[in-house]
């Protein structure tokens, strides 16, 4: 709950300022920083919940009158400090917006993304490629809320910036095309949707390598389009590709942990020398993997044709995900389900027995500490 300190204060008469969110005429200002204005309490509350609580005091030095500089060196140092603060806030607000998106909180993501956009414009200008991630987040949040016209406007601005840059970032291009694909799918324009999702996969593979987890979203959303078109064979093969991508990624991470379990002394001796590995799942990746794999599992289980082997593969991948997310009890539960289902599979059905046994051993190892303290 907000304290009285940050409740909205009425503006002095004659003061013309704009709302932080909608750029309409403001009637209130934040009582905490005194430099942020809103058209009404609803927009103040939305901004507070999204991001303002975290950056309230950080805005004061950026939005108060600059001191009088006695030398050019002081003036230059002051400008560098301002730019440094704005860059920090641009990154922080973008991270907060992305976190809200990964949690499915589309409405809360919008104020944070708008802040990121404004800070980036201040630092880099209105046509810089640094603006594109904020536009994409705003578009994705708008799509999640069903605001297609607003999403299209944000994506048009992002696309215009990317097209102006002859050497666009492949990762950014991937995200741009994915959201364009989702936009056209929501409009029922499946041909254009598939075109953009194919480009999403191409740029993701160009940026990160073939069949990297960054490409899984493109395959998944493309499968959804084919599913809507009742082209089930193609959709099924693409869903299988998504499951394979995540399974391969998680299996590699499990192998690393299993090796550490088998040789704890050596790992412990080298721990201080080892640099952090890149094989770590962040919140966004966990949320994305969970959403896709659970959706595929539901389709597999409810499909007209029984596909036990494919169901087992998805369950195995989800078990790996839960273990890596430190939800050991859920991972254990899924392994028990897999063991029961595996008894019913034909003998010739391929099953990743070694990977599965490694997972079971890791789950059991959690019952005791790896190392003596």
Image (cartoon, grey):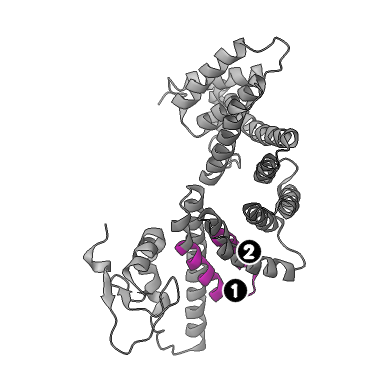
Q: Is residue 73 above or below residue 172?
A: below
The residue under label 2 is 155
Left or right of 17 in this view: 155: right
Q: Using the image, tell me which numbered label, if any, was put on residue 124.
A: 1
Indicate the secondary structure of the residue bearing disc 2: helix
Q: Position of residue 61 (x, y in %)?
A: 39, 75
Does the magenta run of residues contain 121?
yes
Indicate the secondary structure of the residue bearing disc 1: helix
> What residue appears at the point 39 percent right and 82 percent down from the top-left corner?
17
Asked whether the beta carbons under mark 2 and mark 1 sit within 8 Å of each other, the answer is no
Q: What's drawn in magenta, residue-wise? A: 111-138
Q: How many marks?
A: 2
> What residue appears at the point 54 percent right and 24 percent down from the top-left corner?
264
In this view, the residue in front, 332 or 372, is 332
**Quarter of the rendering occupied by the N terminus:** bottom left
In this view, the residue in front, 223 or 119, is 223
Does the magenta run of residues contain 174?
no
> What residue appears at the point 52 percent right and 62 percent down from the top-left corner?
91
């Amino acid at each position: 709950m907000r304290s009285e300190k940050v409740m909205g204060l009425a503006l002095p008469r004659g003061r013309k300022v704009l709302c932080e969110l909608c750029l309409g005429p403001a009637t209130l200002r934040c009582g905490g920083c005194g430099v942020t204005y809103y058209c009404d309490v609803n927009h103040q509350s939305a901004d507070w919940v999204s991001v303002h609580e975290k950056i309230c005091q950080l805005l004061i030095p950026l939005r108060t009158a600059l001191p009088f500089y006695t030398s050019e060196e002081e003036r230059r140092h002051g400008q560098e400090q301002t730019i440094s603060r704005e860059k920090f806030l641009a990154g922080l607000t973008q991270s907060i917006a992305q976190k809200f998106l990964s949690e499915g909180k589309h409405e809360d993501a919008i104020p944070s993304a708008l802040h990121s956009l404004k800070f980036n414009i201040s630092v880099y200008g209105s046509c810089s490629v640094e603006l594109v991630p904020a536009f994409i987040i705003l578009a994705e949040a708008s799509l999640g809320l069903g605001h297609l016209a607003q999403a299209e406007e944000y994506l048009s601005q992002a696309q215009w910036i990317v097209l102006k840059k002859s050497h666009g970032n492949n990762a950014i291009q991937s995200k741009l095309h994915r959201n364009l694909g989702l936009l056209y799918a929501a409009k029922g324009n499946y041909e254009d949707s598939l075109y953009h999702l194919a480009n999403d996969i191409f740029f993701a593979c160009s940026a990160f390598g073939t069949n990297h987890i960054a490409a899984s979203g493109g395959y998944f959303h493309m499968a959804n389009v084919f599913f809507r078109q009742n082209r089930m064979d193609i959709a099924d093969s693409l869903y299988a590709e998504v499951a394979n991508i995540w399974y391969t990624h998680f299996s590699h991470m499990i192998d690393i942990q299993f090796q550490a379990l088998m040789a704890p002394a050596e790992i412990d001796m080298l721990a201080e020398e080892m640099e952090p590995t890149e094989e770590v799942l962040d919140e966004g990746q966990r949320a994305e993997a969970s959403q896709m794999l659970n959706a595929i599992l539901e389709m597999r289980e409810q499909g007209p044709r029984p596909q036990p082997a494919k169901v087992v593969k998805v369950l195995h991948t989800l078990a790996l995900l839960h273990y890596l997310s430190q939800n050991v009890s859920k991972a254990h539960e899924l392994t028990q389900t897999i063991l029961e289902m595996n008894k019913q599979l034909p003998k010739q059905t391929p099953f990743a027995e070694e990977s599965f046994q490694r997972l079971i051993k890791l789950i059991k190892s959690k019952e005791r500490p790896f190392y003596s303290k």
